[in-house]
Amino acid sequence: MDCEVKMKYQELFETEMQRLIYSGEVLNQDLFLNEEDLRYRLRNREALFINKIKDALEKIRNNTFGICEKCGEPIESKRLEARPMTKLCLSCKEEEEFKENLHMDGRRHKSLGVY
């Protein structure tokens, strides 16, 4: 991955992390019945997102950004444009999701906030 592309993603990640840390704008969405529950879920979601940004920035520094953590192949540029913080190439992600679906056992998916 060339330096210009890495710099673009680094700037994107740093800007988004600063927005999440300092803006608090997400917490203004108090339209739900259980406001405390909403705030708790949003804080957790923000924390997870910030950790993903930090991981992506670390990968840029280590020259491993854009490399699939599972197979070691480069992640497709279109996938990175759509999901800049992805850790897996499309085929490895599809395989992971297929396996997750096999083991759901009636539980809600982890992306819904319940593990």
Image: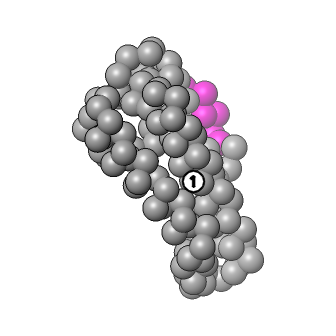
Q: Position of residue 98 (x, y in %)?
A: 46, 26
Q: Is residue 8 left or right of residue 78?
A: right
In-front residue for pair 100/58 = 58
Answer above or below: position of 86 versus 35: above
Q: Main secondary structure of the magenta part?
A: loop
Q: Amino acid at mark 1?
A: Phe
Q: Please state, as top left, top right, bottom left or bottom right, where the C terminus lies in the image.
A: top right
Q: Which residues are magenta?
A: 101-109
In-front residue for pair 66/43 = 66
x 66%, y 73%: residue: 38
Locate residue 76: give its quadrant.
top left
Q: Position of residue 113 (x, y in %)?
A: 64, 53
Which residue is tagged 1?
49
x 40%, y 55%: residue: 12
| Magenta stretch holds residue 5 | no
Q: Can residue 88 be seen? A: no
